[in-house]
Image: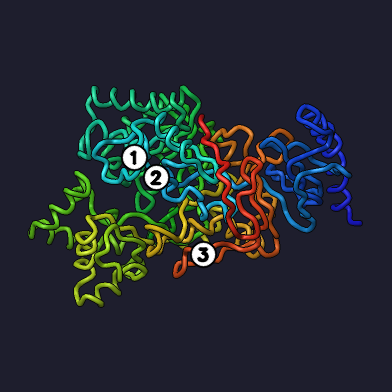
Amino acid sequence: MSSTRSLIDRRAALCGSAALALGALACRSGGARGRFDVLLRGANVLDGSGAPPFVADVALGAERIAAIGPLGDVQAARVLDARGLCLAPGFVDIHTHSDRTIFEWPGAESRVLQGCTSEITGNCGGSAAPHIADDEDAGAGSRWSDVRSYIAAWRQQGAALNHALLVGHGTLRRAVMGSVDRPATADELARMNVLLEDALDQGALGLSTGLEYVPGMFTPPEEIVQLARAVARRGKLYASHMRSEEEALLEAVDEALEVGRRTGVRVQVSHLKAAGRAHWKLLDGALAKLERARAEGVDVMADAYPYTAYSTTLTMLLEPWSREGGADAVLARLRDPATRAKILREVGPHVEREPGGWELVVIASLDKREHQECVGKNLLEIAELWSVEPAEAFARLLEGSNSSVSFVGHGMQESDVERVLAHPLVMVGSDGRSMAPTGSALNDRPHPRSYGTFPRVLGRYCRERKLFDLATAVRKMTALPAERARLAGRGRIEVGAFADLVLFDAQTIGDTATFAQPQQFPTGIAAVFVNGDLAAERGAPTAARAGRFLEA
């Protein structure tokens, strides 16, 4: 036996003795000694800490991990042979946009089938709550008004995985002053602060900003600092889609760090990247700024997804002046010949700067049935199909779908993706959402990150590219984001922790979702447990809705 295996076995024996004793005590309070709900036999346990794996039995009972170790002849209602498989904490997705979509797809198939058991929603400055009466993207939002009633609606429906919610700064600003390009008055800022404090007191995990989106892009830095003070006082999280991920990336990083310096808030840089070929050279400087700030005492970390493309709304390619006022205002400008001509002149240079060309802008979804033939095509192909210039095709797409068009932008390089993922300050976050290839998503071609993020990290970047060892990869997807978000009892395999678990084959786990066929489920995942209930088995979801809403 190798020295490494001996170390693993000794650790398993030591952990098992203490865990078995605790587990037996728990069972005595609930029934027959040694009787559990589920027993996983002989798994290679990756506990989320980053430590090497160890072989152990793991018993589940009453929604939690009840015992770990060589559990001998203890009994369980269900026993799974986990020999040769890896058992990890369920993956914790720190950056998602599922706060509305979960009401259409409560089974969250795109999440649970890739091993995700908890997700943090309300990112990039937009959250489902508090609900705004005229919110153009409210959807199910008529069922709630504030964070408290949103949580109640969520719990009434139920979901297959756990959720937590950030409140969006853009949502607050729009509620108080609309989508105008000016600083908030003292009274407006005070009203935003009241809404924020109410949301935090009602269970929101923290505050998110989307400073490249309307209305966040119109917000001066001082306004963010003032709101972040309330977040800092409560020890909650500030997650920022920064003001630029392109030519002003370094200035945007400085702004995010300054919020942390001035308020003491925990800063989470969302989906760190350098987008657009001309800006790839800026990434090293951005990472260096995070490292220096961390060394100086700023509590900053970042997340990233394992892809060379991002996805956002087509209006992001418009200049700021033409986006003021929201969707209706954009459409009104496009109907005015002179204003339309100016927009068309400006959009081409923007696309050349980032992502780098019309062929790199691929339509993912349209809000209306018109132009559905364009889904999956890039803007150059659409222009050729319609015999128009690409900028004109861009404008017609916005007009045909009330400006609600999403696209995939192929703007990053592979070596940058690898450097970011491997960085010790970076954890994994998908920037995707809970969904399924049914209903309103049936004809969409979304970014594959919603279906493949976590298996892709384990398959491509850990097993094949060897960016990090398996224990480190698991930590970046479990304990690190759970600790960052302060999700108590999540992200670790230890006695007393919630039984959020994923059982997988390290040799076969991988993503199958591609940009051409993104709504494909991964391989190599044997079982997923959420709060002790089986949420997925052998690549198929169950009917379980054991998820909890996680209030901060």
Identity of the residue drawn at 70% across and 60% down: 505
The residue tagged 1 is 141
In this picture, residue 440 sits left or right of residue 429? left
Q: Label 2 amino acid? A: Arg
In the figure, residue 445 lies in which quadrant?
A: bottom left
Q: Where is residue 263 in the image (x, y as percent from the top left)?
A: 43, 26
Q: Distance between the residues labelled 2 and 3?
A: 22 Å
Note whether 410 is above or below 241 in the view shown: below
Note whether 517 is above or below 500 in the view shown: below
Q: Which of 88 and 11 is in front in this view?
A: 88
Examine the rendering and report whether any part of residue 12 can be seen: yes
The residue tagged 2 is 100
Q: Which of 280 and 494 is in front in this view?
A: 494
Identity of the residue drawn at 35% across and 37% down: 143
Q: How far apart are marks 1 and 3 (CA)?
A: 29 Å
The residue tagged 3 is 520
Contact? badges 1 and 2 (CB < 8 Å): yes
Give the tally of numbered discs.
Answer: 3
Contact? badges 2 and 3 (CB < 8 Å): no
In this picture, residue 123 sits left or right of residue 67? left
Circle 3 residues within 10 Å: few <14, some 14–19, many ≥20:
some
Q: Nearer the viewer, residue 508 or 289?
A: 508
Circle 1 residues within 10 Å: few <14, some 14–19, many ≥20:
many
Can you say which quadrant of the picture contains the N terminus? Answer: bottom right
Q: Where is residue 80 in the image (x, y as percent from the top left)?
A: 76, 52
Q: Nearer the viewer, residue 400 or 24?
A: 24
